[in-house]
């Protein structure tokens, strides 16, 4: 591993496979959102926001139809 940047709070390493590792001042690995936040502020990675997936309108129609059928069944039972 090669040291990319070292500060008082953390050290950033670049692994042979191209990924980054971050250790805190105590020598413990930092993972998750904290790691991503550090790497983005240092400009080493870019994070993209996932696109929202819209459900097709065709799937909404059967749900309404089943709700109407349930209402008709309840009215028939009375």
Image (tube, rainbow, N blue to C red):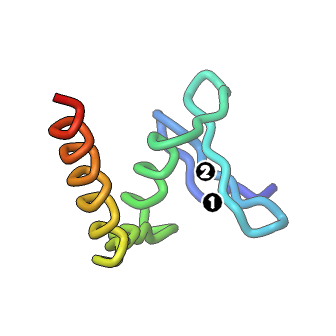
The secondary structure type at the circle numbered 2 is: strand
The percent position of residue 44, horizontal first and vertical second, equals 51, 67
Residue 71 on image: x %, y %: 19, 44
User: Which numbered disc, 2 or 1, marks the residue that appears first in the sequence?
Assistant: 1
Q: Position of residue 25 (x, y in %)?
A: 56, 28
Kindly check if marks 2 and 1 are in contact, taking CB atoms under 8 A apart as contact: yes
Image quadrant in which you'd find residue 24: top right
Q: Secondary structure at mark 1?
A: strand
Q: Is residue 24 above or below residue 18?
A: above
Check disc 2: other Cα within 10 Å, few if <14, some if 14-19, many if 20+. many
Name the spot of residue 78 as percent of width and height, x first. 16, 28
Q: Viewer-proximal residue, 71 or 46? A: 71
Identify residue for label 1: 4
Q: CA distance from mark 2 to mark 1?
A: 5 Å
Relative to 20, is 2 on the left or the right?
right
Q: Which residue corresponds to mark 2?
A: 12
Q: Is residue 43 above or below residue 73?
A: below
- Determine whether 75 is above or below 49 in the image: above
- 35 left or right, relative to 27: left
**Image position of 3 with respect to 44: above or below:** above
Residue drawn at (45%, 71%), measured in percent from left and top? 46
Indicate the quadrant containing the N terminus: top left, top right, bottom left or bottom right: bottom right
List the single residue furthest toward the top.
26
Q: 51 or 62: which is nearer to us?
A: 62
Q: Quadrant of residue 14?
A: bottom right
Q: Which sits in the foreground, 51 or 16?
A: 51
Mark 1: few/some/many CA within 10 Å (<14, 14-19, 20+): some
């Amino acid at each position: 591993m090669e040291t990319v940047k070292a500060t008082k709070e953390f050290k950033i390493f670049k692994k042979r496979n191209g990924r980054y590792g971050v250790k805190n001042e105590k020598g413990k690995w930092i993972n998750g959102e904290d790691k991503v936040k550090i790497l983005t502020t240092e400009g080493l990675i870019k994070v993209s926001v996932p696109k929202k997936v819209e459900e097709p309108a065709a799937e909404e129609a059967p749900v309404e139809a089943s709700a109407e059928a349930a209402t008709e069944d309840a009215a028939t039972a009375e």
